[in-house]
Amino acid sequence: MDNSVGIVQAQCAQFDTPLTFRSGAVLPRYELVYETYGTLNADKSNAILICHALSGHHHVAGYYEGDTKNMGWWDNMIGPGKPIDTNKFFVVGLNNLGGCHGSTGPSSTNPDTGLPYGACFPVITVEDWVESQARLADRLGIQQFAAVIGGSLGGMQALQWSLAYPDRVRHVLAIASAPRLTAQNIAFNDVARNAILTDPDFHGGDFYQFGVVPTRGLRLARMLGHITYLSDDVMADKFGRELRTEKFNYGYEVEFQIESYLRYQGDKFAARFDANTYLLMTKALDYFDPSHDFGGDLNRAFARATADFLVISFTTDWRFSPQRSREIVRPLLHNRRRVSYAEITSAHGHDSFLMDHAHYFDIVRAYMGNVSKEFTA
């Protein structure tokens, strides 16, 4: 396929050194599933880490042999000649701990019991993810990333890298992200979690042992989330008030096309995603706040950062609005960090960071082109 990294293969790294979570819980051993694209140069200075959002995973670019339709979730961004150019960079994507795409998570078998971890899997934070990612970097022999990049929840991880390991990252790209959630965002996450927690098939998180899946709860959680990822303009243009038939049915079955679309998205998501993972990911979003240990002062929190930053927001993103991105920019400027900020006009809401958009791509391409000059000059 044109400009694709082509056929890729997932790899698995096993870790036997215990990982102590921010909560105090300890995971004695774990696995991280990851993929790499491009070639690591001799001094290992061209490595890029891609951090995924809530429902993301390690399959960032390319496709699997015999399954060309299963393209990586950011394949439009990453590949030969693309904004993140694999002719120049060695790109690493991984499935975070607690995930449901191969890395150790709630659906994984607990070697101590022979049963899925389920409700016993520890609540995880962005800080915990970054610690595990740093261990993977050590395994790959990468002492410093040229850039850590992520959108949404992935952007929070990129920010945390600059704070936890300032000497191990030269550039941070935080896209459609925030330094911490607003009360409204926390509220959305709580409603979504309650849809799962109150599903009779959830069984306190141990539904695996009952041979059931809390499909209804996970479906509702995704439907709610999906509404917040789209803009009002996109929903109006795509669906409006269009009916599936020509007249009202005066009942509670699906009548409007938007209802049909949301239920389809909910069903599709519930068939491939783990309910416990959804709970963990949303709580990680809620807990992230670099200023928590600094009396709410983001200026003090970001004083640790030494990287250069590119922060990007989208005009119609109301879940992670441009105001949230500016809350990242201000403390960085206060601390005299080098920051580039772009606010992209886009109709696609929060999902804009995943979309093909010429202006957006040009900005990332130009920035990453400058990054590449650091090791090609």
Image: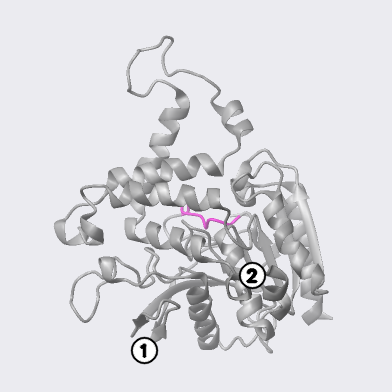
Residue 109 falls in which quadrant of the image?
Answer: bottom left
Image location (x, y in percent) of residue 93: 53, 69
Using a 10 Å C-alpha cutoff, classify the residue at mark 1 as few (fewer than 14 neighbours), some (14 to 19) or many (20 or more): few
The residue to which callout 2 is attached is 159
Q: Which residue is drawn at 70% across and 41% down?
A: 346
Image location (x, y in percent) of residue 292: 58, 71
Q: Which amino acid does label 2 sit on?
A: Leu
Residue 171 visible in the displayed image: yes
Examine the structure image and report whether residue 71 is included in the region drawn in magenta.
Answer: yes
Dominant SS in magenta: loop
The quadrant of the image that shows the C terminus is: bottom right
The residue to which callout 1 is attached is 16
Residue 61 visible in the displayed image: no
Q: Residue at x 38, y 78 (%)?
A: 31
Residue 74 falls in which quadrant of the image?
Answer: bottom right
Q: What residue type is labelled 1?
A: Asp
Q: In this view, does 264 lie above or below 356?
A: above
The tag earlier along the polypeptide, 2 or 1, is: 1
Q: Is residue 187 left or right of residue 326?
A: left
- Residue range corresponding to the magenta coloring: 68-75
Secondary element type, mark 1:
loop
Using a 10 Å C-alpha cutoff, classify the residue at mark 2 as few (fewer than 14 neighbours), some (14 to 19) or many (20 or more): many
Image location (x, y in percent) of residue 193: 37, 52
Q: In this view, does 127 lie to the left or right of 348?
A: left
Are circles 2 and 1 on residues that touch, CB within 8 Å? no
Secondary element type, mark 2:
helix
Q: Which of 94 and 193 is in front in this view?
A: 193
Image location (x, y in percent) of residue 352: 64, 47
